[in-house]
Amino acid sequence: MARTTVRREYTARENANLAQVHDLLTKFTRIGRQTFSGDGTTTEFTWPHGLPDVHGIPTDPQVVLIGPMTDHAAEHPWRWDAAGGNVTIIFETAPTAGTDNVVFCYLIMG
């Protein structure tokens, strides 16, 4: 069975609303990858989340999704904290020593 796509023109008001939603998502969403080098002793790895201040007040993340991208990032239990403008990964046991061997991807929304 063939699919039918229905398209319609949006009103100027709908277009303005869509533009506002897009701007907010762009302004308050950070997607990326963080790479660290384990040394066998460090258990905390921190980076700034980069969400903007609103009227001089720091934006706290409302959604934080973090996933390990390497075996060394996933080899030990870990948790995260997002406070003071930073995201911190806290391992129960330090990851193995290596160069650029602790890699996480993330999506953060304020």
Image: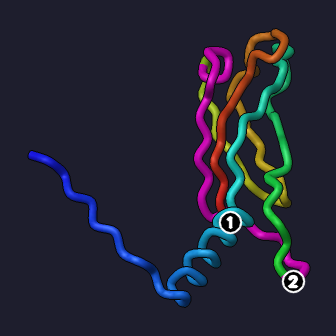
Residue receiving disc 1: 110
Q: Is residue 11 above or below residue 96?
A: below
User: Residue 91 in the image: x percent, y percent?
Assistant: 70, 30
* Residue 40 found in image quarter: top right
* Neighbourhood count class around disc 2 (C-alpha, 10 Å): few under 14, some 14–19, many 20 upward: few
The image's colour scheme reads: rainbow
Q: Is residue 92 above or below residue 57?
A: above
The residue closer to the viewer here, 15 or 30, is 15
- Does the magenta run of residues contain 59? yes
Label located before the other in sequence (2 or 1): 2
Q: Secondary structure at mark 2?
A: loop
The residue closer to the viewer here, 24 or 43, is 24
The label on residue 55 is: 2
Name the residue: 59% across, 35% down. Answer: 67
Q: Magenta segment range?
A: 55-74
Name the residue: 65% across, 60% down. Answer: 109
Dot 2 amino acid type: His
